[in-house]
Every structure is written in structure tokens, then in C-alpha cells.
């Protein structure tokens, strides 16, 4: 949680204020460190400004408080109190009280490492404060723009066929460092950005353990020494209740003096885990975020520097990754589990379908446009985009069961084939419809094709039993070869295109030619005759 004493606006480098030619400010003592930043300007003529400072100020003074004949001791005490209060720099106004900056003040600032800025007579303290706020406003606008662009790029990445790696890549690029997703067991599932050194990698993995909520089956046995710190560096952790943990060796218990191994340790292990924790190791800023799905996933980042807006950007990524890795519907897990048990015990699909939340469903076959085969996380992302958590990865194809009442639309980065709505007993047929629709979609390079309803056709006028018998008789010579049947069906559906059929079946075009020639020979038919093609298409549609 940010320090409440620090304003929400980003700080301004002191060098940026010195660069304002209209102010004419000049640094005359103290370190010329570009890392020195100013949070605000404050004017005080108190001999001891300590009680009135919050830290991070550019303290402005005309030296009214300086007594006549003040020596090195006075200025040493004055500067030391400013440093103790966390002041960022001291601005000393020349005239009307002092013609020059006292030499003893210059020496004291040099000794204590406090930047001393000379304010010329023509520049008022109000002008300095106004310039500082103008620079802060510009920095705030730039920060908001950066955060907005990062949010948009992260959201776009989450919609890609490979959402988890894409989100991590965007996050690593925006932070200028490394982003890692850890699984419930602490395993690195994915990562993006330049690999840090072994010390940083180990420290980040340990920091992830600080925020990971343990599952009931993985409770840690309290150590006699208490929990170990994540690293030798300072760690700050924050929970939704704004709890800050903090020094190495700090242990959460049921009370301030709770002994290791007490019931308080067990309670803390379950409930007191922070939602995020930070550390600095080897000059690298480490942050771990527990993902909100409660399943033990953790996002870790390692960046060489901390910029304004980094926490917001990382939080957006954590929310997206929570959605991508978590359960989409709160009650669906129990329903799926019950349905699976009943199926394994012999129940028919029609009996378990109500447990899944609907009577009629569509089968969707999806294939990512890239060459990489889909993994379970990518498949879950497709299911989330389609509004269903019933997902199956079958080789290079992802199959999704979608309730009939939910619209199936295009998903960027995917080619989809959609079946007609079907009752549970017809799901196998719907699965075949979706597979054929996907093959046709890939062949025609369409992002989505449906096996939809159509108007009444001539084939609907033939009694189904007679149509089925005719189809079986016509296709008997090739029915023992599924490869020939599928090739003939795809070839006819694509109007005899050799190339598109080869693409749809993932075979060479010469293989298509050989199979079609074999079909023509076995069927003893001229496949160039449109009447023959019509008869065969009629028969294939009945199988």
C-alpha cells in the first residue's frame, strides 16, 4: 500500500526543476544525483522545520530565521534536522534578507549530502511551487497515458490464441524486466523478458511463496525457528486489509508474542497471507502478486527500476491472468464433477446433461491460427471467450461445449467450426458436424463456419429410412476406408478443389488426387459428372 504521506501525483526529478530557464535556479552544494526527486514545495522560516515536514519536500527559505552571527554549529543543526525529516532539497532565496547564500550553510549541506539550490532575487517562492506543480501535472498525464496504453495492450494480448504468454510478454516489455507465472506447486509455468541472474531468480521464487495461499492438503508444518524470510533484502507485503510485514524474520501469529508452532501460526498460514509482496535484490525490484482465483497461481516481476504506474500495470496483468487461469463459473466445478462421476458409473449423457446447465448444446471445434499446438491454459482462454468452461484439448484442436442459448461469435486468432444445436444423445453427431465445419473453414480461410439450419430441401422429401438405406448401398465400396470417405466428402464440399482439400485434411495434394482416383475406381463412377457428385453428396450427408 502506498505511504499515505506521499501525494498520489508522481514526483519530479530535481534536475527537471533546475532545467527551467525561467526560474534561474542553481545547485551550489550537495550531490548532483539524477535520482533525487521532489514530491512538493514547502516554505518555512522556522529554525527547526522538522515538525512541519513530511518528507520529499523542496524546503524554501529566505533565511529569516538565521540569527545574527550564526556560525557553523547553527547551520549544521538546521541542515541535520531537514535531512532527518526526509527533506529532498533546500532552496535558499537570495535577498531581501541575505545578499548571498551563507558559506556555513553551503558547507553544512555538502557535509550532510543535502542538495542546496540558490533561488535568485527575481524568482519568487510561489513561482518555484507553481513550476513544480506544472511538472507534476505533466508527469501525471504521461503516467496515465502510459498506464492506459499498457492496459489496452494487455487486454489485446489476453484475447490472443496464446493469452498467458502474450500477457507476460506485454507486461515484461512495459516494465522493462522479467515476468513469470508460477503454478500452485511453485513451478514456473511461463515467463517473458530477459532472464535475471540466479540470485534474483531464486529470490523471486521465494517471494512468490510469501503470497501463495496454501491448499488444505499442503499446509506447512511450523518450524521451531519460525518462517524464513524470502531473501536477505527488505520485504514489504500488503494484504487486502493493508497489512504490512516487514523485516526479515517477521512472523505472523495469533499475537505479538505467539510462539512458533502455536495455533496462531496455523491460522496465519491460512488467512494472513498478503496479496502482494516486494523486495529488492542485487538492485532489482521484485514484486509478487497472488492471483485472485485462489488456486495458488502467482505472478512475479523483476525490473531494474521502479517507475510510476508500474504497480497499476502489474495489477491489471494479475487480474487478466486470474481470469485466464481460474474457474470461470463458481458452481460449474461441482456440476462437472458430478456429471463425470455419473458417466463413469454408467449413466447416459442425456441423464447428466442437466447437471451442466442446459438441454441443448453446440459443439465448437477451434484451431489456433499459429503453428503452436494449444495447451490447457490456451484452451481455457478459448472457453472463456465462448462463455463455457467445458473444454477439451484434442491434439491440435480444442473442443468446447457451448449452451444453445449462448451466441458463438468469432474469436481473434482462432478458426472455428460450429455444429447445430443438439440434445445429448446427438452430441457425437454434433462433434462430427463441428469437425467438418472447421475443416471447411480452414480450407476457405474463413474465421468461423456453422453447420446451421437450412430451408427445406429436396432431400428432406425422401423418407429418412429409405434415404439411409440408399446412402449405405451407394457408399458400400468405400465404407471400410474412413480416409477415402472423409477425402471424398471434403473434396465434394470444396467443389473439387485439390489444393483446398489438401489444406483441410493436412495432406499433400497428390494424396488427395490418389484417394479421389481410388474412390472413382471402387465406386465405378465418373466423379466429373455433376449428377454423380450430387448422388454421392446426398449419400455422404446421411452418414
Image (cartoon, rainbow, N blue to C red):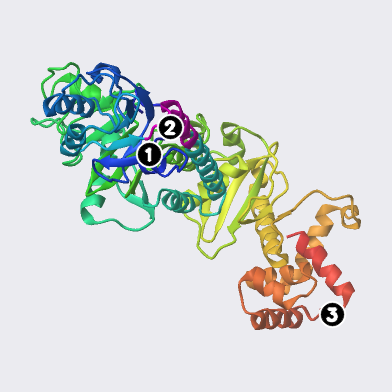
Q: Earlier in the sequence, mark 3 or mark 2?
A: 2
* Residue marked by disc 2: 123
Q: Secondary structure at mark 3?
A: loop
User: Which corner quadrant holds the N terminus?
Assistant: top left
**How far is mark 2 from mark 1, CA to CA?**
8 Å
**The label number, if any, that marks residue 25 in the structure image:** 1
Where are the magenta residues, as a range? Answer: 120-136
Q: Residue at x 63, y 42 (%)?
A: 402
Contact check, label 2 and label 1, Cβ < 8 Å: yes
Q: Is residue 81 above or below residue 24?
A: above
Helix, strand or loop for the magenta stretch, by majority: helix
10 Å neighbourhood of mark 2: few (<14), some, or many (≥20)?
A: some
- Identified at 47% across, 55% down, the residue is 375
Query: Which residue appears farthest toward the left when viewing the image?
Result: 224
Q: CA distance from mark 3 to mark 2?
A: 93 Å
Decide if residue 478 is in sight here.
no
Q: Nearer the viewer, mark 3 or mark 1?
A: 1
**Numbered circle sitting on residue 528:** 3
- Residue 360 locus on image (x, y percent): 68, 38
Amino acid at each position: 500500500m502506498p505511504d499515505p504521506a506521499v501525494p498520489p501525483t508522481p514526483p519530479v526529478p530535481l534536475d527537471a526543476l533546475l532545467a527551467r530557464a525561467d526560474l534561474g535556479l542553481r545547485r551550489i552544494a550537495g550531490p548532483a544525483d539524477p535520482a533525487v526527486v521532489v514530491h512538493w514545495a514547502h516554505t518555512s522560516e522556522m529554525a527547526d522545520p522538522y515538525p512541519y515536514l513530511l518528507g520529499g519536500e523542496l524546503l524554501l527559505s529566505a533565511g529569516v530565521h538565521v540569527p545574527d552571527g550564526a556560525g557553523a554549529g547553527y547551520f549544521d543543526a538546521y541542515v541535520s534536522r531537514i535531512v532527518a525529516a526526509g527533506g529532498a532539497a533546500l532552496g535558499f532565496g537570495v535577498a531581501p534578507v541575505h545578499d548571498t547564500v551563507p558559506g556555513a550553510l553551503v558547507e553544512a549541506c555538502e557535509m550532510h549530502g543535502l542538495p542546496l539550490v540558490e533561488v535568485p532575487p527575481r524568482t519568487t517562492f510561489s513561482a518555484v511551487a507553481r513550476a513544480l506543480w506544472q511538472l507534476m501535472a505533466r508527469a501525471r498525464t504521461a503516467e496515465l497515458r502510459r498506464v492506459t496504453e499498457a492496459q489496452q495492450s494487455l487486454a489485446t494480448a489476453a484475447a490472443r490464441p496464446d493469452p498467458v504468454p502474450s500477457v507476460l510478454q506485454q507486461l515484461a516489455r512495459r516494465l522493462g524486466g522479467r515476468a513469470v507465472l508460477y503454478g500452485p506447486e511453485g513451478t514456473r509455468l511461463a515467463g517473458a523478458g530477459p532472464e535475471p541472474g540466479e540470485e534474483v531468480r531464486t529470490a523471486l521464487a521465494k517471494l512468490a511463496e510469501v503470497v501463495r495461499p496454501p491448499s488444505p492438503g499442503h499446509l506447512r508444518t511450523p518450524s521451531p525457528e519460525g518462517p524464513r524470510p524470502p531473501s536477505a533484502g527488505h520485504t514489504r507485503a500488503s494484504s487486502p486489509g493493508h497489512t504490512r510485514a516487514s523485516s526479515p524474520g517477521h512472523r505472523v501469529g495469533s499475537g505479538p508474542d505467539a510462539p512458533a508452532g502455536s495455533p496462531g501460526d496455523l491460522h496465519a498460514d491460512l488467512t494472513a497471507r498478503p496479496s502482494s509482496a516486494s523486495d529488492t535484490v542485487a538492485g532489482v525490484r521484485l514484486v509478487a502478486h497472488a492471483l485472485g482465483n485462489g488456486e495458488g497461481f502467482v505472478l512475479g516481476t523483476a525490473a531494474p527500476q521502479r517507475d510510476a504506474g508500474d504497480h497499476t500495470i502489474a495489477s491489471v496483468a494479475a487480474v487478466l491472468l486470474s481470469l485466464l487461469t481460474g474457474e470461470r463459473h463458481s458452481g460449474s466445478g461441482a456440476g462437472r464433477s458430478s456429471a463425470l462421476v455419473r458417466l463413469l458409473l454408467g449413466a447416459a449423457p442425456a441423464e447428466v446433461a442437466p447437471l451442466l446447465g442446459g438441454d441443448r448444446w453446440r459443439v465448437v471445434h477451434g484451431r489456433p491460427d499459429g503453428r503452436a499446438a494449444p495447451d490447457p491454459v490456451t484452451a481455457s482462454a478459448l472457453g472463456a471467450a465462448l462463455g463455457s468452461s467445458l473444454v477439451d484439448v484434442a491434439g491440435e484442436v480444442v473442443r468446447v461445449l457451448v449452451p444453445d442459448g449462448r451466441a458463438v461469435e468469432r474469436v481473434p486468432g482462432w478458426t472455428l467450426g460450429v455444429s447445430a444445436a443438439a440434445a445429448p444423445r446427438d452430441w457425437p453427431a454434433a462433434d462430427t458436424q463441428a469437425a467438418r465445419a472447421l475443416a471447411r473453414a480452414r480450407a476457405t480461410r474463413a474465421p468461423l463456419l456453422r453447420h446451421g439450419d437450412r430451408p427445406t430441401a429436396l432431400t428432406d422429401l425422401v423418407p429418412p429410412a429409405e434415404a439411409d438405406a440408399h446412402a449405405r448401398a451407394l457408399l458400400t465400396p468405400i465404407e471400410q476406408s474412413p480416409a477415402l470417405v472423409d477425402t471424398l466428402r471434403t473434396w465434394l464440399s470444396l467443389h473439387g478443389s485439390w489444393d483446398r482439400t489438401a489444406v483441410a485434411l493436412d495432406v499433400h495434394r497428390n494424396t488427395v488426387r490418389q484417394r479421389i482416383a481410388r474412390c472413382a475406381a471402387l465406386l465405378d463412377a465418373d466423379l466429373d459428372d455433376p449428377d454423380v457428385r450430387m448422388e454421392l453428396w446426398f449419400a455422404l450427408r446421411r452418414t
